[in-house]
Amino acid sequence: MNTMMYKGYVGEVEYDDEYKIFSGSVINTRTVITFQGASVEELNKEFQLSVDDYLEWCKEDGIDPEKPYSGKFNVRLKPNTHQRAAVRAKTLGMSLNSFIEKAVEDELKVTEG
């Protein structure tokens, strides 16, 4: 997957060989935000303009733009896994939230490294 980022918004990009154009869409909002460009430079410019247009539209309409990631999400675990994680966090002197955050960070280091 080819992605680009601007102001926390992530655009996913594809190339259409038939029409010789890049097209993309923001993938971390429910709002549909799309952009196109014939070159990488144009694509990047159009991506930024599309995000800026979305933010301006929200401002003009008096609504809060979707925040790509608030830092909050619900995790559903099997009860036994939940219990084991809570106990392990406690033995490490951590909150369950800190324990889960560290586990995710550790896994991301493995996959990115």
Image: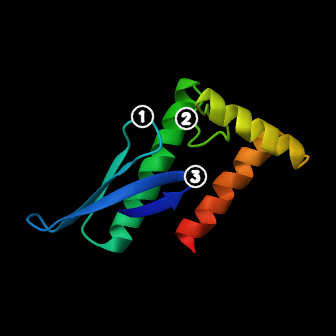
Residue 104 is situated, as x and y percent measured from the top left of the image, at 64, 53
Dot label at residue 31: 1
Q: Amino acid at mark 1?
A: Thr
Dot label at residue 66: 2
Residue 52 is situated, as x and y percent measured from the top left of the image, at 50, 48
Q: Alpha-carbon distance for marks 3 and 1?
A: 14 Å
Disc 2, disc 1: CB below 8 Å? yes
The correct choice, above or below, for 50 with respect to 14 in the image is: above
Residue 18 is situated, as x and y percent measured from the top left of the image, at 8, 65
The outermost residue toward the right is 93
Q: Please tell me in which quadrant of the rendered image residue 109 appears.
A: bottom right
Q: Amino acid at mark 2?
A: Glu
Tell me the residue at 45%/62% (across/down): 4
Q: Amino acid at mark 3?
A: Gly
Tell me the residue at 80%/38% (across/down): 87
Q: Which residue is mark 3?
A: 8
How many residues crowd mark 1 within 10 Å: few (<14), some (14–19), many (20+)?
few
- Point out the tag, 3 or 1, that comes first from the N-terminus: 3
The correct choice, above or below, for 31 with respect to 110 in the image is: above
Disc 3, disc 2: CB below 8 Å? no
How many residues crowd mark 2 within 10 Å: few (<14), some (14–19), many (20+)?
some
- Point out the tag, 2 or 1, that comes first from the N-terminus: 1
